[in-house]
Image: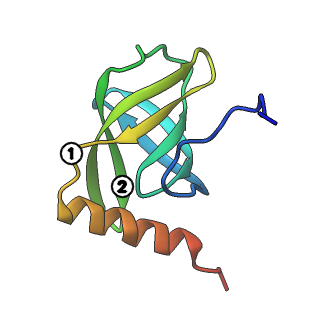
Amino acid sequence: MKSNSRKRHRLKDRVPCDIDCVINESVVCKAVDISEGGMYVLSNHFFTQGSIITVSVHFKDKKIDIHAKIKHCNEGVGIGLMFIDLDDTIKAKIRELLKDINQPTL
């Protein structure tokens, strides 16, 4: 029996977060979930599906610039991003960010 439910195609589970970020050095927004492969960002700006953007995240007094492809845009709500062209340094920084998010606060 086939299910009509929409399948998720993510390779990595996303972690809930509350991270300020900037798209293309001009659009301030907030990431609400992130994984090693992408993130969902709240923004009331319209972005064209398939566009390539740069999302900047500040973490431990450093700026991480991540190239991403717009996978979908929920106009007036936010955008789903898939990270692209990640080198080993950026991957390591994203993993460190995820580890920090998952640390319990005392």
Relative side of 61 to 29, left or right: left
Give the residue at x 57% y 57%. 13
Relative side of 26 to 1, left or right: left
Q: Position of residue 98 (x, y in %)?
A: 47, 67
Give the residue at x 33% y 26%. 26
Residue at the far front: name it: 1
Residue matched to label 2: 58
Give the residue at x 54% y 42%. 9
Q: Is residue 64 above or below residue 42?
A: below
Which quadrant of the figure contains the C terminus? bottom right
Give the residue at x 50% y 57%. 12
Q: Kindly identify the amino acid type of the residue bearing the numbered disc 1.
A: Asp
Tell me the distance, in whole angstroms, between the alpha carbons under discs 2 and 1: 19 Å
The label nearer to you, 2 versus 1, is 1
Residue matched to label 1: 85
Q: Position of residue 2 (x, y in %)?
A: 77, 33
Q: Position of residue 65 (x, y in %)?
A: 25, 47
Q: Secondary structure at mark 1?
A: loop
